[in-house]
Each structure stands twice: as structure tokens, then as C-alpha cells.
Image: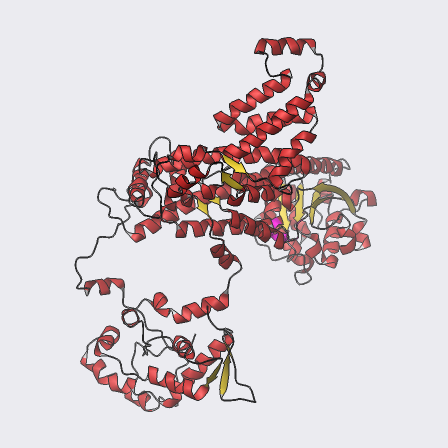
Amino acid sequence: MAPAAAPLVEFPLPSTVENIETNFEPFYVLHKAPSRKNSRKTNPCGKLRKKGKLSPSGPNGIENPETEERDDSTLEHLRMEAFELVWSRIETTIKDVLRDTNVKVFDDICRWVYKAFDAIRSSGTPSSSSASRPFPILTRADCKILFTGLVLTKNMEVVDDLLTFEELGYHLKSHRCHVASLSSQELSAKSSIDGCIKSLLRQLLKVTVDSADMFVLASWYREQGYYENPVVVIVEDIERCCGSVLSDFIIMLSEWIVKIPTILIMGVATTIDAPSNVLRSNALQQLCPSKFVLGSPTERMEAVVEAVLLRHCCMFSIGHKVAIFLRKYFLNQDGTLTSFIRAMKIACVQHFSMEPLSFMLARSIVEEENKDGNRALFLEVLSKHASDFLSDSRYPLVEGTGNNVGNVLSELERWQKGWSAVVQCLYQVGKYGKVQLLDLLCEALDPQLFKPITSENSSRLQQGKGVSFSSSCELQYQFSSRKDGYIYQAIRKVRDLPAELLHQLLVSWEKITGCVPEIHEKVKDLLLAFKLGDGKSSEKAIADVSKRHASQKDLFIKYPKPMIEKAESFLSSLVSEHTRPIESVPFHELICFKDVRKLQLALIGDPRRRIQVDLLEFQKIIKCTCCNENRNSLLPCAHDSTIMYNLAQEHGDLINLHDWFQSFKTVVSHPRTKGNLRTKQGSTPKKKKDKPILENKSDASIQARFCTAVTELQITGLLRMPSKRRPDYVQRVAFGL
């Protein structure tokens, strides 16, 4: 940034002052604002309120609520602590889900590794004399085959593969494999084959070795007695590696395979033919490839969305516009799951920073993880601070809450379970029609598609008076069906299902709705009616029917059409009764983030606008006494770039450099008041003596600062420098905010 006009802490000597025009300092120190502690001491307005202190003895560092006074810093601390609890739960859930989606493939890879290891060891183990020689053993060509697993990741960005191969490494280590991972940087032309060997030695031997010698690795493997455990080398992305280096590395591993039984695993992001496009022919001849296919990025993303936003590992939720933005952001980022998770985290951060009562989301997590009551005091603190906000006008007072945020959150949690259960039921049907979960979720969150059945109830809900929380959530909403909508397609898809698939669907519904008793009982009745065909028989009759029918298929074919229509009608009623969007529920602000503009600015950004705001509203950033007391005037203690840009607002698209410089000179040469001087320099006689010398700035120093500030504004993209045609003017290239 440009040098500030404030003097340095140490004042120049008289001899230096005389030559100040020719001896410019390269840097200037921006003046510091007086500490709040000092400003509070000089504040004559009255007694200061006591700030809440953190007690290490209390839970979460919070004092007794009887003695703690509500303070902005305390509430901010509570919100940040709640964010850490909530996001920690979400992050753990995401890692578990991604691990579960790949665990079947990881098990297959682990079994293949040990089969390949047995095949290598079947050719015989080296004798003690041959194993002690510092060179590979000469064997037949068929004994130098390197078993290679090609893992198709289907990711456009390697950032998603990092976590996948890290989990694969942990999985193989848990099955007694020695695992080392090589990145594309370690298999580059700059690192060469020596860098690969050193990386293997560093990861397997846990020491740093100067010499890149495979005999060191062979000695370690023989001396430690690891003959029963294979060595697995993972190459994360073969397409990004240097082909010649990777080819030499494969040939070297194949030569040492008798002494060091090594299995190679390579990640492939494009097609199975990628190795032939990267490796040389002599290296390809040494490979015995096997193919393993991971789930697609869309499948992994849907698993994450289902676990976080539908099963609700915590109560955090998103609005309709935010969901649409996240879907577009995922597609625009080439299906990069890491970018999607980062966007989810930023949305969570924005919610906890904007919503005053967001700290109450930690309540359910604390109650679940501390059932023995160790954090009863922490819950009491949350309730105390939350009760102060319920009287706020932006929170409509709804009957049935008892003016208690705990009751509100309990009702919201009950509503969430019913809503998510119905959306999951729709998704189970949509799978047969290849409906994407995120598309279905965006439509289920759209408040425009769900309207109250009666206008009277709608007006009462909008007023927020005379309607209890429970009754407002239980009011039936009519779904405005669109024939091209995903919910409509899912409901209509029930008609096309054969009886066997319909039975499987009802069984899955029974598992999904287990946490919602009122829906679960209806699903059980529907499943019972489906088994009987007419839904009127008893349990004893079911047993009799089951004995008469030898196969379950005959039981299903008896009454398929009426039951399919009944299942379709049941699903349609669930949509009308339980899929009210969250943005239409009272107190949804507590758990729902819907400010998509904030999320867009955080992810995509608007740097030019942010720079202009910071330059024009510098008082909010510096927070010094002199700037805050004189908001309508420019002071010489402000930053040079700030002064310059504020003065530029007085001009049009062209700024005359001479007029601009004269205005800048007037501001920075303005004499300071004694109060400001006392705040920055103190009141010693010596500093008062130096005052007139420091304020008598030369035109050369002011012009140097002026040129530096103009250059900074040009670098930030706010100005265009003078042209040969008009050398005395600069052009503004940014207007407004």
C-alpha cells in the first residue's frame, strides 16, 4: 500500500531533517489506532459494562450464567464454538460417507493385492546369499511381471483423488500392507528416478536417506522379516506424471520384484487406455493390469447430500436459491466434490456469522454427545442468551413455543424428520427414472410450488399470531405439479413399477420412515395391504395366504393395479402433508441459510467492488479515534491511497493530475490538532519541539507519495494511466459500487 502521512515512531535528528528532501525513507508506518482500553479510560460517558470473561474451569470456558453479562464478544464466541461443533459433525459425516461408498472397491483391491503377492512368492524366495547382494536377482522374464491395479476415478480434478487414495492407503495398511504414495510432482522430469526412490525410502523406512539405492529398501524388507506382507506403491494420477520417469520406475520395480514383492496401483482419471498413452512399450510389457472402478463424482456427491442435507447429521439446512447455486457450482467446477464441500462450509460459516441465534444449533449436538449432563451449564448459557432475542420483532411470536428456543428447535427437528423422510421416499422412486437427488432437493425446497390449501390459514401464518407452531407445520400444502418437474415424475413413476419392485420400494420406505411414527405406521399398513392384495385381512389371514402360495411372485401378481394406484395416492398425500419448504416454516432463520448473494461473493468474489468499499469506508477498518470522530472529512493521518480515491470521487471519468495533486497536498499538509498530536506523540517537551519541523513537508516528498498512490490505484484496476495523447489526465475505469 502507499505510505501513510503519519510520522515514524522515532524522530529524525536535525541533521537528517535538513537533508530530508534527498534522503527519502523507502517505507512509512501506518499510524496505529489507540487501543480500546485507552479510549475506554478516557470515555466520560459513564460506567463501562463488564465483559464476559472465559473461565477455564467451566465447560467450554464459559462462566456461570448468573454472573455473566451479555456481550457481543461472548455471543460471537458462542456462535463460533457452535460452528466448530456443527461443521465437525458434518465433516466427519462426509468422510464416513465417502469411505463407505468406496469400501467395496477397497476390499476388492485388498483381496487382489494378496492374490498378486501369493503369485509373486510362488516363484520362490531369494536365498540369504543372493538377498545380501547389492543388485537385483537375474530371473526369467515371466518372473519380472509387475502386478498393476488401474483405479478409474472418473474425476476431472486430482484434488478429489487425494482423499480417495489416502483412504485406500489407510485401508491397505489396516490389512498389514506396506504402503507408499507417489504424486505427479515426485514422478516429474525434475525429480527423476532418484526422487522416486528417496520418497519410497522416506515413507517406508521412516528416515531420510541421502543415497537413492534400492538395495537399502531390500535390506530393510529382509532384515525386518516382512516376508508375509506385500509392498504397495500408489501413483495418484498417471496422466500428470512424466512418461519417461514413470517407465523407468516401473522397469526398476520389476527388476527388484523378487527381493521386494511390490504391487503397483495407479489412478486413472480418463480411460483405461491411459497407460498406453503415457508409458513406453518396454514398460507396458512388464505390467499385468487389473481394472477397478470407483463411483462417479455424481454418485459421491449424492451420497454426501443425502447424509448432510436429508438425514440431517445436524440441524443446519439451506434455502432454495442456495441449493440451486450449489448445484450450478458443482456442475461448473467439472463435478469436483471438494469444491462442493468447500462451498457448503462457506455457507455454514456465513450462517453462523449472520444469524444471532445460530449458536443454538449446538444444543442438539451437546445433548446427544453428553447425555450424562456434563454440559448442563453450557446449555443453560445458550438458553439464557437465546431468550433475550425472542422478543426481537424479526422473529414472529408463535403460540406453542412458550417463548423458549429449545421448544422451537425441537419442533423444527420434528418437522425436518418428516420432510427429509418424504424426500428420501421420492428419491427411492426417482432412482428408477434416473432422477438426480440434487435436482429433486432443489424442487422440494422451492416455496413457490407449495401453497396452503386455504387462504385463511395462509394469512394467519403470515401474521404469525393465533396459530401454534405444531399446527402451522401440520397444515396441508398443495403441491403445484409441473409435468416436467422431478417430484411429479417420481410420483408418476410408481405406476410403471412391476409388483416386485413396488414391494422392494415399500420395504425401503419402511426403513426410511422409522424415525417418523405417523408416516411409518401408514407405510406399514400399505405394505400389509400389498401383501394381502385387498388390505382387509388380519395377521392370521396373512399367514394362511403365505402357506397357500408357494412363491412370493404369485402373491404379488394377484392384485397389482389397485395396489399400485394406492401407493401412488399415498405418496402424493405425503408430498402435500409433509414437504412444506423450510423457508415457509416459522423460525426457519435459526437453521436455514438462504442468502445466496453472500455465498456468491465469498466463492466467486467481486474484488474491484471490495477494494472500492475498503477505500471509501476506511474508518470501519482502521477504527481509530480521529477517523471515527471526523467521518465527513479527510485527515492527513489516513492512508494515501484512501485519500486519493476519496478525492477522485469529485471528478468524472477523467481526472486532471494537477488538480488531483493540489487537493492531495492540501489534505496531507493540513496541520494536526493538539488532541491528535497528543494521542500519537505524547506530550513531552522534546516531541512538541519537533512538531513544526515534521509538519513542514516538502513538495518532493508529497509528490513521491502521490505517484506511489496513483500507481497502487492503477495496479488495483481502478485507474488507467495517462496516455501520450493526454499526459495530464488519468482515466477512471471503475464507477459506483
Percent position of residue 625, x then y? 27, 69
Percent position of residue 287, x then y? 78, 46
Residue 723 to residue 481: above or below: below
Residue 348 to residue 114: above or below: below
**Is residue 584 a member of the stretch shown in magenta?**
no
Q: Residue at x 39, y 82 (%)?
A: 25
Q: Residue at x 43, y 49 (%)?
A: 351
Residue 313 to residue 657: above or below: above
Q: Is residue 356 left or right of residue 523?
A: left
Q: Residue at x 64, y 46 (%)?
A: 297
Q: Which quadrant of the view contains residue 661? A: bottom left
Q: Is residue 45 left or right of residue 731?
A: left
Visible residue check, residue 260:
no
Percent position of residue 503, x then y? 65, 24
**Is residue 158 a member of the stretch shown in magenta?**
yes
Number of numbered discs: 0
Image quarter hosting the N terminus: bottom left
Visible residue check, residue 187:
yes
Percent position of residue 194, x then y? 67, 58
Q: Nearer the viewer, residue 465 or 259?
A: 465
Q: Nearer the viewer, residue 614 or 536?
A: 536
Q: Is residue 348 left or right of residue 495?
A: left
Q: Is residue 366 left or right of residue 113?
A: left
- According to the image, what is the colour scheme of the structure? secondary structure
Q: Which residues are magenta?
A: 155-160
